[in-house]
Image: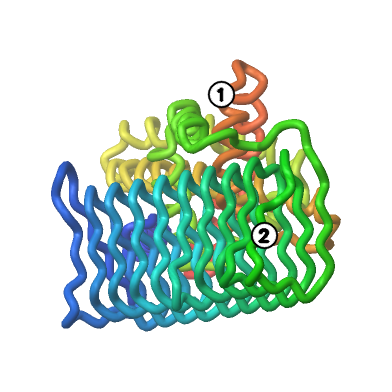
């Protein structure tokens, strides 16, 4: 019996919310979540109406909320989502930001990806690698060490780009007197760019006229974002994404094993998973009618509930990994933040399709559930 309790403990460790070398802070309502200047953390996972990070993170920071203010130093990567985002502290590696207003005011050690309504790259900011952005209005006054790939209605470029600049679907493009483009400028817009006399474009300039822009103005940009939020419930998607991402970061080998083994024999796992899902609670109920079996029955119900919760979290990972393998034509299954995010969004869309969508996700769920139960039984056998 003691060994079986170990199994339950192991399963509970798989549930996000257990922290290892990480700081988790979350506040409800109008409360703020703060990491003080005097605090040093390894990894931080933050959520609240207002998030203020002025401490030091040795590795990653993941944050979500309404008003986001990052003034502290981040050693590795920053992943952030919110309404108003200001990043004035240095980030050692990459930044992934999604929000309404995004304001960058310090150096980034690797690449920057941003999506929102307005995106500002302040003067003195240096992005070491590529800058990928999509917004209604993009204003660049800093330096970009790689390429700049931009999509937006109004694009104002007044900084230095070491690589190429690619602009798609723009309404108005302005190249200011302080702009320096060491590579090529390729842009699609409804009209030719306004290029100041002091601007330097060392490569070729190619203009392609388009009839309409991707986002016509700031109001439409906000409307598009609001539509996405209302359609897919951005808050739920974000929480789900962060939870799954944390699970993968906590136990990457287990997550990969569940994905690969589930897809190794999909049909067999679907049937086995369905059988486990139906038979397990029935067996637990029968155990309740025996005195000796009551503790075991409660244990089985506990394992069953945790297994269901974990299987639901693995489903979006499988969806994202499959999509990247199919379209990317890779031999192995890719599991990272991007595949998880894509998987969560696609699963939300598929789940909104009546009957067919839920059935498709259920089949994937059965595959994962079978593997979780199999691993649990293998663990029990190994303890004998």
The vertical placement of 361 against 32, above or below, is above
The residue carrying mark 1 is 352
> Residue 8 versus residue 81: which sits nearer the camera?
81
The residue carrying mark 2 is 195
- Left/right of residue 48 with respect to residue 96 in the rendered view: left
> Residue 83 versus residue 376: which sits nearer the camera?
83
- Left/right of residue 276 with respect to residue 97 in the rendered view: right
> Residue 136 versus residue 26: which sits nearer the camera?
136
Residue depicted at x 25% and y 58%: 51
Residue 237 percent across, percent down from the top left: 46, 41
Indicate which disc residue 138 carries.
none
State yes or no: discs 2 and 1 in contact (Cβ < 8 Å): no
> Residue 116 versus residue 31: which sits nearer the camera?
116
Residue depicted at x 37% and y 83%: 58
Q: Residue furthest left?
A: 31
Q: Quadrant of the N terminus?
A: bottom left
Classify mark 1: helix, strand or loop. Answer: loop
Q: Residue furthest top?
A: 354
Residue depicted at x 52% and y 80%: 109
The vertical placement of 107 against 101, above or below, is below
Classify mark 2: helix, strand or loop. Answer: strand
Q: What is the C-alpha distance between the residues marked 2 and 1? A: 46 Å
Disc 1: CA contacts within 10 A as few (<14), some (14-19) or many (>=20):
some
The vertical placement of 357 against 55, above or below, is above
């Amino acid at each position: 019996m003691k060994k079986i309790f170990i199994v339950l403990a192991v399963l509970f460790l798989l549930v996000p919310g257990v922290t290892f070398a990480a700081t988790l802070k979350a506040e409800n309502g109008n409360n703020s979540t703060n990491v003080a200047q005097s605090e040093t953390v390894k990894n931080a996972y933050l959520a609240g109406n207002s998030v203020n990070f002025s401490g030091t993170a040795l590795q990653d920071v993941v944050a979500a909320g309404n008003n986001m203010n990052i003034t502290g130093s981040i050693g590795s990567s920053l992943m952030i989502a919110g309404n108003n985002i200001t990043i004035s502290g240095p980030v050692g590696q990459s930044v992934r930001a999604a929000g309404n207003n995004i304001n960058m005011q310090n150096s980034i050690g690797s690449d920057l990806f941003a999506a929102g309504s307005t995106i500002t790259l302040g003067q003195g900011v240096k992005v070491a690698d590529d800058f990928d952005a999509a917004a209604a209005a993009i204003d660049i006054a800093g330096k970009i060490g790689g390429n700049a790939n931009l999509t937006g209605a109004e694009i104002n470029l007044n900084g230095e780009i070491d690589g190429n600049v690619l602009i798609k679907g723009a309404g108005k493009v302005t190249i200011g007197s302080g702009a320096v483009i060491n590579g090529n400028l390729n842009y699609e817009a409804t009209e030719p760019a306004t290029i100041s006399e002091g601007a330097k474009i060392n490569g070729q300039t190619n203009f392609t006229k388009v009839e309409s822009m991707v986002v016509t103005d700031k109001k439409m940009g906000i409307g598009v974002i609001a539509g996405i939020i209302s359609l897919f419930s951005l808050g739920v998607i974000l929480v789900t994404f962060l939870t799954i991402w944390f699970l993968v970061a906590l136990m990457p080998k287990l997550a990969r094993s569940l994905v690969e083994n589930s897809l190794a024999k999909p049909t067999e796992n679907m049937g086995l998973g369905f059988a486990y899902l139906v038979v397990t609670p029935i067996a637990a109920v029968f155990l309740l009618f025996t005195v000796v079996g009551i503790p075991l029955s409660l244990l089985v119900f506990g394992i069953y509930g945790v297994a269901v919760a974990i299987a639901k979290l693995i489903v979006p990972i499988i969806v994202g990994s499959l999509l990247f393998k199919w379209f990317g034509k890779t031999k192995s299954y890719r599991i990272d933040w991007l595949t998880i995010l894509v998987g969560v969004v696609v699963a939300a869309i598929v789940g909104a399709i009546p009957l067919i969508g839920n059935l498709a996700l259920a089949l994937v769920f059965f595959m994962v559930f079978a593997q979780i139960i199999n691993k649990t039984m293998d663990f029990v056998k190994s303890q004998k």
